[in-house]
């Protein structure tokens, strides 16, 4: 597929000739001022600085193309450094707060990124000249190796609960934000398959990978269970908007029961009550960033605000010089997930975690494009660089926008 600019202008020379440079720069400066002032008002100088860096890194990993079959714009995202995968769903998801927050009604990046994934999973690849039959009962992990989208389903990196939850949550937010279900019309059977998979697999994910697969297996992962439960609630929300009220209510009741089981199976600690890394591991903990879209979507019927407050308060007792570890197994962390967690905190908690991430970016000894995976004692790079997941730095902006909408 040709780049969208080429479809519109034909050549780079023509594009440059037709664009009013002064007018374009004026528009860009105005947008910079608008966005910077909003970021500064929310989190001050440090938040504005790391977010401006994250903006360039996240948007730079995307490309807009012209879909010659459907005569519309599509977008793709490159995973970068951890892999060369195309539109990895658990990379799109952590990056999504930026693209869900800053958009306009005529150009919605996350919708344009999700459309190719929906097409692939819905067995619509033949019309593009390569039939790749998708036969899995859960959402795909990615589409191929950049820039070719030809991955057979049996070569997927299987993350059933992770990716199914991610897709349903992002789609539900698009519907909530835009009030439009029409783009999902061809995919209801697909969404039903994913929703029913989550319903059948909860409340215990058993032994499967989650997005933090670099840490190794983590069976009975309680944070992944939260993802599944929020994902199932998102599917119930979609059904509710489709006026399939009975099924939506049944799934909501089922999900509420799952969350009660989650609380009983994951709670740990006597003096510092918190949730475990895994249901079966006492004296453990992990960042429960998957609560974020419970807040964004206002799913107050699953989990409680107290659950989230308790978790945030506990995390603040686990701070190292440059951040909060991802869990109790290692001293390293993820910058994006920290900012997801920060978004749900009080203003003091948000600014404390933001300042930790800023301090890492300012003092890291590794002169490379910003990593999202680093050590909290030394600010040293553990792995990954230049990845778009840092779009998650805009979680606070998304949450505040969603609350007001």
Image (spheres, rainbow, N blue to C red):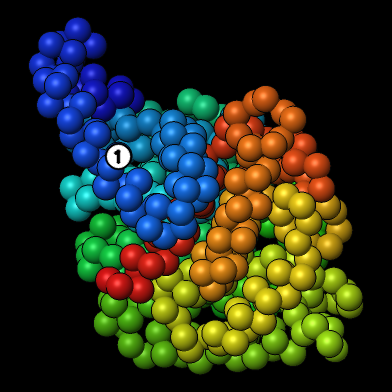
Q: Residue furthest top?
A: 13
Determine the residue positioned at 34% across, 65% down. 401
In the displayed structure image, the side of residue 58 where residue 36 appears, left or right: left
Determine the residue positioned at 17% across, 16% down. 15
Confirm whether residue 146 shows in the render: yes
- The residue that label 1 is drawn on is 32
Q: Where in the figure is residue 296, as x and y percent of width and height?
A: 43, 70
Q: Where in the figure is residue 187, as x and y percent of width and height?
A: 35, 59
Graded by Cα atoms within 10 Å as few (under 14), some (14 to 19) or many (20 or more), the crowding at tag 1 reads few
In the displayed structure image, the side of residue 104 where residue 133 appears, left or right: right
Kindly indicate the quadrant of the structure image that contains residue 55.
Answer: top left
Determine the residue positioned at 35% across, 73% down. 403
Quadrant in the picture for the C terminus: bottom left
Indicate the secondary structure of the residue bearing disc 1.
helix
Confirm whether residue 85 shows in the render: no
Residue sitting nearer the eye, 359 or 218: 359
Q: Where in the figure is residue 128, as x and y percent of width and height?
A: 35, 32
Image vertical order of residue 307 relative to residue 109, above or below: below
């Amino acid at each position: 597929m040709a780049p969208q600019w080429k479809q519109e202008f034909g050549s780079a020379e023509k594009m440059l000739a037709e664009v009013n440079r002064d007018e374009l720069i004026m528009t860009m400066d105005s947008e910079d001022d608008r966005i910077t002032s909003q970021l500064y008002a929310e989190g001050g100088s440090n938040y504005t600085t790391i977010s401006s860096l994250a903006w360039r890194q996240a948007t730079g990993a995307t490309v807009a193309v012209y879909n010659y079959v459907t005569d519309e714009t599509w977008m793709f995202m490159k995973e970068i450094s951890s892999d060369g995968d195309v539109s990895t769903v658990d990379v799109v998801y952590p990056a999504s707060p930026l693209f869900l927050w800053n958009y306009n009604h005529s150009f919605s990046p996350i919708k344009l990124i999700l459309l190719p994934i929906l097409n692939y999973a819905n067995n619509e690849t033949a019309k593009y000249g390569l039939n790749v039959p998708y036969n899995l009962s859960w959402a795909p992990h990615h589409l191929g190796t950049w820039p070719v989208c030809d991955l057979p389903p049996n070569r997927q990196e299987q993350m059933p609960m992770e990716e199914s939850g991610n897709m349903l949550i992002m789609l539900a937010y698009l519907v909530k934000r835009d009030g439009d279900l029409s783009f999902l019309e061809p995919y209801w059977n697909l969404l039903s398959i994913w929703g029913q998979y989550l319903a059948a697999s909860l409340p215990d994910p058993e032994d499967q990978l989650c997005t933090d697969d670099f840490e190794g297996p983590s069976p009975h992962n309680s944070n992944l269970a939260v993802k599944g439960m929020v994902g199932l609630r998102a599917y119930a929300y979609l059904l509710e908007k489709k006026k399939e009220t009975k099924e939506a209510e049944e799934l909501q009741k089922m999900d509420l029961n799952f969350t009660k089981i989650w609380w009983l199976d994951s709670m740990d600690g006597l003096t510092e009550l918190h949730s475990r890394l895994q249901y079966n591991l006492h004296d453990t903990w992990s960042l429960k960033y998957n609560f974020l879209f419970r807040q964004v979507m206002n799913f107050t019927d699953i989990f409680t605000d107290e659950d989230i407050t308790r978790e945030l308060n506990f995390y603040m007792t686990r701070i190292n010089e440059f951040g909060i570890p991802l869990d109790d197994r290692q001293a390293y962390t993820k910058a994006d997930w920290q900012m997801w967690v920060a978004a749900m905190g009080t203003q003091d908690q948000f600014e404390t975690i933001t300042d930790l991430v800023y301090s890492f970016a300012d003092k890291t000894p590794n002169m490379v494009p910003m990593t999202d995976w680093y050590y909290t004692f030394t600010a040293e790079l553990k792995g990954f660089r230049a990845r778009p997941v840092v779009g998650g730095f805009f979680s606070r902006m998304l949450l505040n926008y969603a609350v007001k909408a």
